[in-house]
Amino acid sequence: MYKESTSYSSIRTAFFELRKNISVQPKIEIVNTNHKSLGRILYNAINSTVNIPLYDSSHMDGFAVLYDDIKGASNLKPIILKVISEVKLGNTKCEPLEPGQAARIPTGGYLPPKSDTIVPIEYSQFNKIDRSVKIFSEFPKGSFISLAGKDITKNKLIFKKGHLLRIQDISLLNSMKIKKLNVYKKPKVAIIPTGSELTNDIDEVAYGKILNTNGQIISTLIEASGGIPVDLGITSDNVKMIKSKINNALSQNDIVLTIGGSSVGHKDLIAETINSMGKPGILAHGIKLDRGRVTKIAAVKSKPIIILPGPIQGAINAFIVLALPLIRSLIGLSHNNYVFINAKITDNWKARKKFQNFVKILYVRLSYSKTNNSIKAEPITGETSNMTVMTRANGYVLVSEKITKIEKENNVQVNLLPGFSFASSNPIDFL
C-alpha cells in the first residue's frame, strides 16, 4: 500500500526530476499564413524572399515626374506637365515618362520607368480637361521615393526562431507570398478531475455535490497558455477507473493533469494508482509551494503527470509553477519571458509562519494611481478554497523562498497570466 511522505521537494528540484524522466519534446506542424496562425510560435527563422518595396515606389499621393522638368517651379512660375497615365497600386507595367510628362501616382504605387521624383499632390493642380498638371514647387531629385528594398531587402532575416506571430507579422509574411509556416505544435494536455463528490450539473449542487469549476478553470488556462485542453471528464474515487483514465490520457496526450485527490498523511488514490502503473511513478510527494504544497509530480511511460490540489488557489499555483513552464517549453517559449508589470505594493505582506521557506504566490489587484502616476498592487489574501481571492486578483507575485515579507510601497514584479489577468493574449484590460 502506498504511503505518502510528508517531506517536500523544492520546485526547482521537482521540475528538474520531472524533465529528467520524460521524453516529451517540441513538435512541428505546418499552418497557413492567415488569422489562424495568430499567436503561434515560429519553429524556424524566416528570411525575406523578396525586396520590400518590390520596386521603387511613392510614399506620397501626387505625381511622378522627371526632376529636370520641375527645376525652378514656384507659385509665381508654375511648370505645366502633360499627365500621360495614372498608376494603379500593384501595377508594374507603366508607360515610361519622357521630358514634359508626368503620371498620377498613389502612396505605394510603383514609379513609371525613367521617373525620378515625386511631387506631393498639395504642391500641384490637376486639370481634368486637358489632363495637365501645374507644379508649384521644386523638390530635390529622389524626393518622396522609397527605393526597392528600402524597407526589407531580399534574404534579410525577418523573424527569428521562437517569434510569436502577431497580426502585423502575418500581413508582412503574406506580402512576401509566404503561404505556409512551420510552427511549434500545440501540446495536448489531458485534464482528469477526480472525486466522487464532483458534478458538472449545477442543479446537483443542491443535493451535496460540488461543481467541477476547477476543471473548467484549468482548461481555460491551458488554452490561454498555448496548449490544447483535453477534458477527460470527472472520475470517481476508484483505482480501476483512475488507472484507465490515466492510461488513456498518456496514450493520446503530451501532459496529464489530475485535479484533486492529493493530500498529506492519509491514503491517496491518485498516487497509489500512478505508482502501480510503472516506474518511476511519483517523483515528488509534495513541493515547497504555498499554497499548493500537496502537489505531486510523476512520470509514467516517459510522460509527465502533475497532480494538482483540489482547492482553487493550490490548483492554479501548481499550474503556474509546473504545468505552465512545461507547456511553454513545448511551444518554443522561454521560461523567463512572461508578461509582467512593475508596481508598488499598497500594504505590508508577510508569509505564513509555517511555510516561510516555501515559494509563495501572492495574488494582487493592479490599479492605476492618478495621484503619483504609478501602478499599484493591492495584496489579495484568503483561504485556499476562496474563489473570491481569484476573482478580485488580476496578477500574481512569485515570492522566493528567501523572502518572508514585503513592506508597503516596495516595488514588486507582477506577472500577468492570459485568461486570468486578461481575456486574451494581450494585456490590454488588466486595469
Image (cartoon, rainbow, N blue to C red):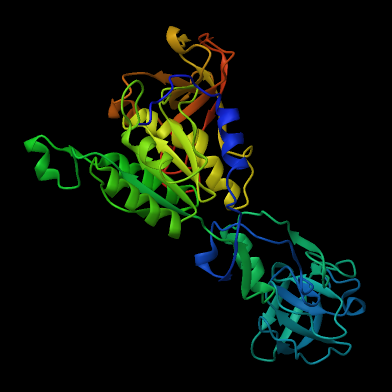
Q: In the rendering, at what x and y percent does residue 188 appear?
A: 46, 56
Seen in the picture, residue 299 relative to 39 is either above or below; the reply is above
Q: Is residue 327 left or right of residue 79?
A: left
Q: Farthest front residue?
A: 1
Seen in the picture, residue 91 relative to 239 is either above or below; the reply is below
Which residue does the image show at 60% across and 58% down from the upper left? 165
Q: Farthest left residue?
A: 207
Quadrant for the C terminus, please: top left
Which residue does the image show at 60% across and 51% down from the upper left? 23
Q: Quadrant of residue 65?
A: bottom right
Residue 229 appears anywhere in the view: no
Q: Quadrant of residue 185?
A: bottom right
Which residue does the image show at 56% across and 31% down from the upper left? 14
Seen in the picture, residue 157 relative to 240 is either above or below; the reply is below
Q: In the rendering, at what x and y percent does residue 303 appear?
A: 51, 49
Along the line of sight, the residue nearer the viewer: 208 or 419: 208
Q: In the rendering, at what x and y percent does residue 270 appear?
A: 35, 38
Quadrant for the N terminus, please: top left
Along the line of sight, the residue nearer the viewer: 23 or 3: 3
Which residue does the image show at 53% across and 47% down from the upper left? 327
Along the line of sight, the residue nearer the viewer: 257 or 3: 3
Q: In the rendering, at what x and y percent does residue 135 appear?
A: 78, 75
Residue 117 appears anywhere in the view: yes
Q: Is residue 325 left or right of residue 122?
A: left
Q: How many marks?
A: 0
